[in-house]
Amino acid sequence: MKRALLLCLAIILAFAVVVFGWPLVLELGEPETGVAAQAYAGQVEHGQYLATAGNCASCHTARGGAIYAGGRAIETPFGQVFSSNITPDRATGIGNWTADDFWRALHHGKSKNGRLLYPAFPYPNYTKVTRADSDAMFAYLQTLPAVDQANRQHALRMPYSTQPVLAIWRALYFRPGVYQAEANRSAEWNRGAYLVQGLGHCNACHTSRDVLGGSDEQEDLAGGMMPMSNWYASSLTSDSKAGLGNWEKQHIADLLKTGVSERAAVFGPMSEVVYKSLQYLNDSDMQAMAEYLKSLPQSTISPPSGDAVLNKAQQDFVMDWGGKLYGKHCAGCHGEKGQGRAPAYLPFADRHSLSMSSAVNSIRIVMNGGYPPGTAGNPRPFGMPPFRSMLSDEEVAAVVSYIRNAWGNQAGWVTPDEVNRYRSVPVN
């Protein structure tokens, strides 16, 4: 019987060779397998791009640690949250997760076991990510080297470390939902909105937060102090003074892509975002994000006038003293009239970042110096030298007040006490 079956199979194969040709017989199973493999490779590549857009590696990699193996401490007003291992290690990572489990984390803010995740993982933004993009990211993460590294326990104060309190927070601030395109907007605008609101999670930093750590939806992307970092994230709205209202679209795209533009340069936490994430996005996505940001309505926030309230004589004294300090230490690079030589030496005249309600960024840069990120579009960044040991608190206050109120700028006055408050703050 077995011999008869083998004989029949041989006859069938011989018939196929004679009638159809052997090459055709060989190819019958290959196209489907090849197409599937190509599709999977494309999904992984797309997932890598999306993970880069979300800057996932920055948070999920401890300094000096294996990439995506977690362990980075994220400082919050409520204690420390440690990022998790998202390599495909089955014991300590997400190797035993499914695409459904990963989607549940991004979209619903819940772990595989149903435990609520802390919003230091920005699922209030990631919930806008489509299921197809979530699956692509998961496919990419599953191709990474598995790293056996146990997750660290969070160091949150009571009662913030409890699930019931987290459930209350979610009820107040979290609404799951995939991004819905606006029919009356262009495809480019919707793509920009999808990236900014979702994977880019821009409002996680550029929106003020209340005492419970919730974002103010009425002032989305209108700027705010970043908790625990002592940097002020500027307004991304169309406010002409503190926002992007009078920026050209290309200048916004340049800043996001390279870290510098004709209008500004990035420092502090934003440098890491540009260096590790945004510089790798394609130009069409940069233009889309700029298109969306350029369209945001002006903020209704009324910037405070600053810590100091000075009379006319005091203002004149500060401007005179600050002007002399500026002429001695700053004019050589930034120009006597604040005109600068962009992008190497940024102009100060009509500079939106100097009109922000908080002067913390200017104070920290004057004292500590800083460099924009070194990117493909800005491979040799010019830096600002530190003046911490050269200028006193009073002198820093005077020169920062001067540049915030000269050449058409109009902002609050800076006090020596305010400068001293940030003198002991770590550089980064």
Image: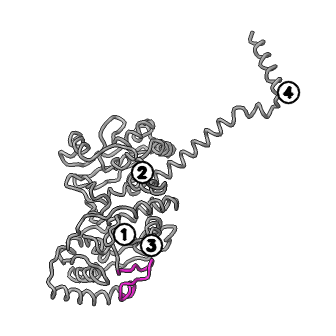
> Which residue in the protein does label 1 denote?
245
Q: How crowded is mark 3: few (under 14 residues within 10 Å), some or many (20 or more)?
A: many
**Residue 39 on image: x %, y %:** 59, 42
Question: Which image quadrant: the N terminus?
Answer: top right
Give the secondary structure at mark 1.
loop
Q: How crowded is mark 4: few (under 14 residues within 10 Å), some or many (20 or more)?
A: few
Front label number (1 vs 2):
2
Q: Which of marks 2 and 4 is nearer the N terminus?
A: 4
Q: Which of marks 4 and 1 is nearer the N terminus?
A: 4
Q: Which of marks 3 and 4 is nearer the N terminus?
A: 4
Q: Are marks 1 and 3 in contact (CB under 8 Å)?
A: no
Q: Which mark is drawn over residue 182?
A: 2
> Disc 1 to disc 3, how far (Cα)?
15 Å
Image point 57% across, 46% down: which residue?
42
Give the magenta range: 331-349
**Residue 163 on image: x %, y %:** 24, 40
Q: Are marks 2 and 4 in contact (CB under 8 Å)?
A: no
Front label number (2 vs 3):
2
Q: Are marks 2 and 3 in contact (CB under 8 Å)?
A: no
Q: Do the residues labelled 4 and 1 touch (CB within 8 Å)?
A: no
The amino acid marked with disc number 1 is Gly
Q: Which mark is drawn over residue 18?
A: 4
Magenta span includes 126: no
Above or below, comparing residue 191 to residue 131 in the picture: below
The amino acid marked with disc number 2 is Glu
> Which residue in the protein does label 3 denote?
261
Residue 57 visible within the image = no
The amino acid marked with disc number 3 is Ser
Which residue of the protein is positioned furthest toward the right in this rendering? 18
> Disc 4 to disc 1, how far (Cα)?
74 Å
